[in-house]
Image (cartoon, helix red, strand yellow):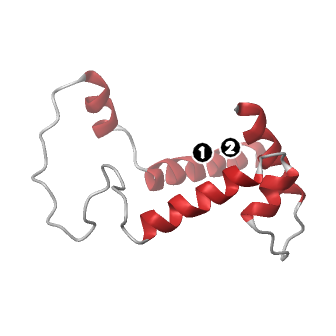
């Protein structure tokens, strides 16, 4: 199956920007039988029309469940104390300024 996925990935990379290609065309070029494409299309239509159970996906607009308190773990403590992205960028900028100032002397 990975071989089919790899072929589809390669084919989609070859599609020029701005060109429209159907899933069926890509599937045919990848060597996937038309019956498989038609079955996938049928099942997607059924999911969109809610004709079949769509699995564990719940109502997106339902009330959110109560948050669960995470159990203590050293990794969580390390993440809580880690610098934010902005702090990291600021620290990097300061380090560059210090380096350039020392180099200019």
* In the displayed structure image, the side of residue 105 where residue 16 appears, left or right: right
Location of residue 55 in the rendering, given as x and y in whole percent from the top left corner: 34, 50
Tell me if residue 94 comes above or below residue 19 in the rendering: above
Q: Residue at x 70, y 32 (%)?
A: 1
Q: Residue at x 76, y 39 (%)?
A: 4
Q: Nearer the viewer, residue 29 or 33?
A: 33
* In the displayed structure image, the side of residue 70 where residue 12 appears, left or right: right
Q: Which residue is mark 2?
A: 99
Q: Which residue is mark 1?
A: 95
Q: Name the residue at the top extreme.
A: 74
Give the SS element for disc 2.
helix
* In the displayed structure image, the side of residue 17 where residue 82 appears, left or right: left
Give the SS element for disc 1.
helix
Location of residue 38 in the rendering, given as x and y in whole percent from the top left corner: 66, 59
Q: CA distance from mark 2 to mark 1?
A: 6 Å
Location of residue 72 in the rendering, given as x and y in whole percent from the top left corner: 17, 26
Tell me if residue 99 comes above or below residue 17 in the rendering: above
Tell me if residue 91 comes above or below residue 45 in the rendering: above
Q: Nearer the viewer, residue 91 or 102?
A: 91
Q: Are marks 2 and 1 in contact (CB under 8 Å)?
A: yes
Q: Residue 25 has which mark? A: none
Q: Nearer the viewer, residue 40 or 4?
A: 40
Q: Residue at x 60, y 62 (%)?
A: 41
Q: Nearer the viewer, residue 96 or 79?
A: 79
């Amino acid at each position: 199956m990975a071989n089919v996925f790899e072929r589809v990935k390669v084919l989609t990379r070859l599609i020029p920007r701005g060109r429209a290609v159907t899933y069926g065309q890509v599937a045919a070029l990848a060597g996937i039988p038309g019956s498989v494409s038609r079955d996938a299309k049928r099942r997607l239509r059924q999911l969109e029309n809610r004709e079949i159970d769509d699995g564990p996906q719940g109502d997106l607009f339902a009330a959110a469940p109560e948050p669960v308190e995470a159990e203590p773990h050293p990794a969580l403590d390390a993440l809580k104390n880690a610098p934010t992205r902005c702090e990291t960028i600021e620290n990097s900028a300061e380090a560059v300024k210090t380096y350039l100032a020392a180099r200019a002397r």
